[in-house]
Amino acid sequence: MSVTDGPEDDDATPLHPALRRVAAPPMGALLGFELVEVSGGRAVMQVAPRAEHENGGGVTHGGLTASLIDSATGCAILSAVAADAVIATVDLNITYARPIPIDGGTLTATATVDHLGRTVAVASCEVRDPKGRVVTLGRATYAVRTR
């Protein structure tokens, strides 16, 4: 999927301008995130843990999936707000369900918008390993402002 291209059908909502840049922001590129799918309050992102993501204990550092959840929930919300909206994370809650091996394969984060208000939005996210097991859960609250 190319996030720089708009939807192909005329009835679809065009991508939020910020989502056009999300494929390669410096932080996402540094961590190896890939935006796979985004539309209508839902986003899917992936990352394959690398040696640089190790926490020193032989498994993936929790900050990798926390950042993945923050990015995926932000994309889900951006796909649902007005084009002139700006969002900022104000709360991020993470639950680590199981350790993630460095060589365990690609992780998939699926985020959905739970609440979209005029000034506050909330989204939840599950991160699953290649076997479909939940490895990390998250919920993020965002301030929503219009320009």
Image (tube, grey):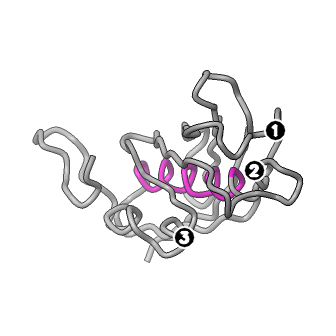
Dot 2 or dot 3: first in sequence order is 3
Tell me the crowding category of disc 3: few under 14, some 14 to 19, or many 20 or more residues within 10 angstroms, Cα based: few
- Residue type at the position of mark 3: Leu
Q: Secondary structure at mark 2?
A: loop
Mark 3 and mark 1 residues within 8 Å of each other at the beta carbon: no
- Looking at the rendering, the stretch of residues picked out in magenta corresponds to 65-80
Residue 99, label in figure: 1
Tell me the crowding category of disc 1: few under 14, some 14 to 19, or many 20 or more residues within 10 angstroms, Cα based: few
Residue 60, label in figure: 2
Residue 30, label in figure: 3
Q: Horizontal placement of 51 versus 18: left or right? A: right
- Residue type at the position of mark 2: Thr
Q: Residue 77 at x, y = what percent?
A: 50, 51
Which quadrant would the C terminus be assigned to in this image?
Answer: bottom left
CA distance for labels 3 and 1: 22 Å
Q: Horizontal placement of 55 versus 105: left or right? A: right
Q: Quadrant of residue 128?
A: top right
Q: How many marks?
A: 3
Residue at left offset 49%, top offset 70% = 86
Q: Residue 144 at x, y = what percent?
A: 56, 64
Mark 2 and mark 3 residues within 8 Å of each other at the beta carbon: no
CA distance for labels 2 and 1: 7 Å
Mark 2 and mark 1 residues within 8 Å of each other at the beta carbon: yes
Q: Main secondary structure of the magenta part?
A: helix
Q: Secondary structure at mark 1?
A: loop
